[in-house]
Image: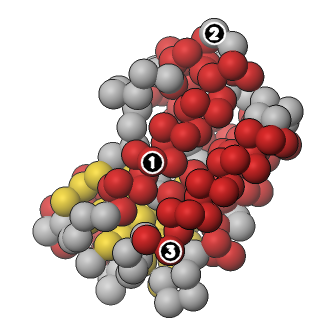
């Protein structure tokens, strides 16, 4: 079984991944943050210089995580395209860089093993901003609300990027207490 978890930055994908991995006895695969040599450079140095390098790192890291069986992924290769598109739209990635990224994505896509379920944890942009602020990652402090609005629009397009036989579940995530969250996890399949 393979489950992927998508949503805005700060929505709680890692927490959900941890809880669901225990319940379903799946190996959790987390987004490359602490071990990513380009993330802080992208946020603090020169985003245009590091955007392509960062996106390629994420693309191949996420692809490799898709290859393992019995996993739950905190962000997938399908969600990664949201960031590449947004960076292109904002002029941070050039058209040529975006085109190159999409060619790489297209070459990898046929080799992505079947994804059983995509869980979209949905919160408002305001709720995501609040959560980002509370977790205190320094490099995320400059994320603007307008960026998350654009990202939200991209995330809403993920179902169109998924294989047709992947079950898509959108959950309004912010207002649930722990018991409700566990009930949601139990009811996924």
Nearer mark to the viewer, of 2 and 1: 1
Q: Residue placed at 73% from the left, 28% from the top?
A: 144
Q: Are marks 2 and 1 in contact (CB under 8 Å)?
A: no
> Which residue position holds label 2?
45
Q: Are marks 2 and 3 in contact (CB under 8 Å)?
A: no
- Is residue 84 visible from the viewing direction of this image? yes
Q: Residue placed at 56% from the left, 63% from the top?
A: 107
Q: Residue placed at 32% from the left, 86% from the top?
A: 189
Question: What is the CA distance from the residue labelled 2 to the residue labelled 3?
Answer: 35 Å
Q: Secondary structure at mark 1?
A: helix
Tally of numbered tags: 3
Q: Residue placed at 40% from the left, 46% from the top?
A: 61
Question: What is the CA distance from the residue labelled 2 to the residue labelled 1?
Answer: 23 Å
- What crowding class fits label 2: few (fewer than 14 Cα within 10 Å), some (14-19), or many (20 or more)? few
Q: Are marks 3 and 1 in contact (CB under 8 Å)?
A: no
Q: Secondary structure at mark 2?
A: loop
Q: Is residue 109 above or below residue 117?
A: above
> Which residue position holds label 1?
60
As drawn, which residue projects farthest toward the top?
45
Q: Is residue 131 above or below residue 119?
A: above
Quadrant, the N terminus? bottom left
Report which quarter residue 143 is drawn in: top right
Q: Where is residue 52 shown, x and y percent of the image? A: 64, 33
Residue 12 vs residue 97: left or right?
left
Q: Where is residue 71 shown, x and y percent of the image? A: 26, 65
Mark 2 or 1 closer to N-term?
Answer: 2
- Give the label on residue 110, or none: 3
């Amino acid at each position: 079984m393979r489950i992927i978890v998508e949503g805005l930055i700060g929505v709680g994908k890692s927490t959900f991944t941890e809880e669901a991995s225990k319940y379903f006895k799946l190996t959790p695969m987390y987004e490359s943050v602490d071990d990513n040599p380009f993330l802080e450079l992208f946020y603090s140095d020169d985003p245009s210089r590091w955007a392509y390098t960062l996106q390629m790192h994420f693309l191949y890291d996420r692809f490799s995580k898709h290859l393992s069986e019995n996993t739950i992924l905190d962000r997938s290769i399908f969600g990664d395209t949201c960031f590449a598109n947004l960076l292109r739209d904002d002029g941070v990635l050039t058209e040529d860089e975006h085109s190159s990224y999409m060619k790489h994505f297209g070459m990898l896509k046929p080799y992505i093993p079947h994804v059983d379920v995509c869980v979209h944890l949905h919160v408002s942009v305001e709720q995501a901003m609040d959560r980002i602020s509370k977790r205190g990652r320094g490099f995320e402090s400059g994320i603007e609300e307008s960026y998350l609005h654009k990202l939200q629009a991209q995330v809403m397009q993920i179902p169109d990027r998924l294989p047709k036989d992947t079950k898509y579940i959108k959950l309004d995530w912010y207002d649930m207490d722990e018991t409700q969250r566990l009930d949601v996890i139990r009811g996924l399949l």
